[in-house]
Image (cartoon, rainbow, N blue to C red):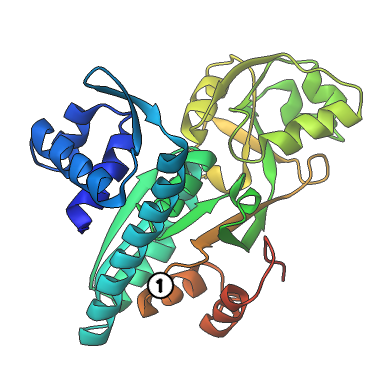
């Protein structure tokens, strides 16, 4: 048994049993991938994949059990390499951050800039996706930390820690009736078309909950994952924008006015998550603390050593 065989199994599964794609990701040939898998099956004495002719079409029952072990072995192999690098040089390496567009665009720039000054020899990689994709990147060992508002606390294998709380704002063109409406209410907002986030992003669930609690069904005419897109269409009069307050910059968004909606829509919590059984390098602890100062290395290590499915301050 060797790591090439394990990687061949993992990539075949990730590529939906397409061995040509798996071979491309492993920088080898399709016959080479087939050979590695066949040799592992022969060594284990069981078939990992269900075959239809020469094609793989699924996992056997034994294969499903083997696949979970393969994932853990390869993650721990990466951890061993990380430990070796840590012991030889704890200020050099790579930090892979999986996050949403809103976090990458508005929350992370000062954190990343400060981190780069402290750790100039650490390469940073930002991977963007929706919250579910972000969680799965960390679980698969493709990213070291996940940062998002939704979903992260739903995965028992992740330690999801509270980073910071934030609120929403209503954005409208200058001179719009909501620019001067006092007090601003959900009823007043619901009289207009609404532009806001896709259901999986940026506290959208709290927006829907707020309207529903008042018996309102706003006309959501456009959804997006990008705050800048929402503001762009609000500026041309398509509807009233509802965005994360951090996404509004008065010096840049000069054609718009932002109205604070913190009293109308429940605040949201952005979390930062680690895989519970992953090795965490010193500079990763430093990044987490810069992102959320209450999450010191001692606090995070204590949480990682504990049990349960989440983390609360």
Q: As drawn, is 237 to the left or to the right of 251?
A: right
Image quarter of residue 186: top right
Of residues 116 and 155, which is closer to you in this image? 155
Q: As drawn, is 120 to the left or to the right of 141?
A: left
Image quarter of residue 90: bottom left
Q: Is residue 127 above or below residue 114?
A: above
Q: Answer yes or no: is residue 252 visible.
A: no
Write the residue at 59% across / 50% down. Answer: 152
Write the residue at 67% across / 71% down. Answer: 307
Q: Is residue 231 above or below residue 98?
A: above
Q: Position of residue 65 (x, y in %)?
A: 46, 47
**Outermost residue toward the front?**
45
Q: Answer yes or no: is residue 80 visible.
A: yes
Which quadrant holds the C terminus?
bottom right
Image quarter of residue 187: top right
Q: Position of residue 192 (x, y in %)?
A: 74, 15
Q: Is residue 71 above or below residue 81?
A: above
Of residues 46 and 97, which is closer to you in this image? 46
What residue does disc 1 label? 279
Q: Position of residue 304 (x, y in %)?
A: 57, 73
Q: As drawn, is 198 to the left or to the right of 66?
A: right
Q: As drawn, is 301 to the left or to the right of 262?
A: left
Which quadrant holds the N terminus?
bottom left
Circle 1 crowding by C-alpha within 10 Å: few under 14, some 14–19, many from 20: some
């Amino acid at each position: 048994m060797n790591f090439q065989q394990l990687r061949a199994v993992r990539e075949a599964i990730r590529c939906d049993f397409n061995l040509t794609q798996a071979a491309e990701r492993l920088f080898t040939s399709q016959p080479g991938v087939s050979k590695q898998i066949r040799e592992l099956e022969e060594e284990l004495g069981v078939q990992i994949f269900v075959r239809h002719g020469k094609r793989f079409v699924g996992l056997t029952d034994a294969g499903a059990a083997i696949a979970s072990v393969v994932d853990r072995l390869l993650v721990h192999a990466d951890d061993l390499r990380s430990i070796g690098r840590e012991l030889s040089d704890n200020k050099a390496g790579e930090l892979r951050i999986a996050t949403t567009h809103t976090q990458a665009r508005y929350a992370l720039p000062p954190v990343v800039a400060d981190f780069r000054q402290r750790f100039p020899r650490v390469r940073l990689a930002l991977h963007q996706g929706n919250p579910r994709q972000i969680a799965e990147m960390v679980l698969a060992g493709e990213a070291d930390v996940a940062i998002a508002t939704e979903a992260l606390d739903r995965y028992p294998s992740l330690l999801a820690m509270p980073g910071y709380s934030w609120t929403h704002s209503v954005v409208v063109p200058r001179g719009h009736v909501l620019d001067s409406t006092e007090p601003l209410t959900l009823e007043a907002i619901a009289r207009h078309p609404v532009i806001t986030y896709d259901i999986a992003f940026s506290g959208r669930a709290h927006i829907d909950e707020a309207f529903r609690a008042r018996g309102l069904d706003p006309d959501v005419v456009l959804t997006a994952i990008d705050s800048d897109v929402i503001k762009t269409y609000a500026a041309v009069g398509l509807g009233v924008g509802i965005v994360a307050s951090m996404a509004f910059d008065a010096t840049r968004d000069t054609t718009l006015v932002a109205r604070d909606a913190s009293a109308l829509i429940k605040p949201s919590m952005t979390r930062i998550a680690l895989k519970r059984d992953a090795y965490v390098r010193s500079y990763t602890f430093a990044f987490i603390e810069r992102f959320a100062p209450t999450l010191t290395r001692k606090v995070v290590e204590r949480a990682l050593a504990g049990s349960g499915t989440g983390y609360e301050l």
